Amino acid sequence: MSNSEDEDLPQLSSHALAALQEFYAEQKQYTDLGGDDKYNIGIIEENWQLSQFWYTPETALRLAEEAVAAAGEGGSLRFAEHEEIRTASLLSLGTHTEIYSVVACVSAPSVYQKLRELHRDDFSICIFEYDHRFAIYGEEFIFYDYNNPVDLPEKIAAHSFDIVIADPPYLSEECLRKTSETIKYLTRGKILLCTGAVMEEEAAKLLGVKMCKFIPKHTRTLGNEFRCYVNYDSGLDREL
């Protein structure tokens, strides 16, 4: 290639080159994570521009344990076929029957991470997130944009999750309404919603949930009071 041809090639500015190098370094950081380290809360830093605020480890554990208890009551009868978990009726189950509880974490990565730390082999978990950094979780990561509530991969069947845990990223009627569409599409019945206390009336109207006594905490102090809401008899609504 001649010098004149080299000069015609587009050149990155020093700022663009630095940004690109930072991006690659960040991606390598997450790719290099192994074992349980990648499930540590905070291993992926909060991005305030995406309205990300992580729960404290104590809150994440309490919500994860609640999900295990709620989803495990009866569980889902499922069988493995071609490496996919499919719902099956009792009559059609063969000798390869396994009992799975299936949990969806919608915009609630801290709960997903804590669930994975519990090492439950009888649970299948999906993390629905807009932030592609969470793609480090492989096939359990499902890209999700609340602006397109049911624009989901074909492998995500309607009403296929025993419980849906959701934490809409924004305290707005629009965000809650659209996220509610996703929740109702995914759940077989049980809902655990975490959002601001100011959304109590709207949450009850959209999802039929009620506020619990348990108060979730975040690693950073937020300006709005946060609460949990459920539509079933929950341990979060009992005295601590």
Image: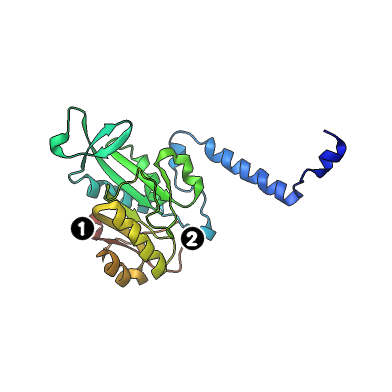
Give the camera-side residue of 34 and 126: 126
Residue 157 position within the rendered picture, expressed as x and y whole percent measured from the top left = 31, 46
Give the camera-side residue of 178 and 125: 178
Query: Which labelled disc corresponds to residue 232?
Result: 1
Residue drawn at x 27%, y 47% as measured from the top left: 160
Residue drawn at x 62%, y 41% as measured from the top left: 25
- Of the numbered discs 2 and 1, the one sitting upstream in the chain is 2
Query: Which labelled disc corresponds to residue 51?
Result: 2
Residue 142 position within the rendered picture, expressed as x and y whole percent measured from the top left = 42, 46
Residue drawn at x 40%, y 45% as measured from the top left: 113
Residue 119, placed above or below residue 110:
above
Query: Residue 53 vs residue 207: left or right?
Result: right
Residue 13 position within the rendered picture, expressed as x and y whole percent measured from the top left = 76, 50
Residue 147, placed above or below residue 97:
below
- How is colour applied across the structure in the image? rainbow
Residue 49 position within the rendered picture, expressed as x and y whole percent measured from the top left = 54, 60
The quadrant the N terminus occupies is: top right
- State the image quarter where residue 216 is shown: bottom left
Q: Are marks 2 and 1 in contact (CB under 8 Å)?
A: no
* Residue type, mark 2 in image: Ser
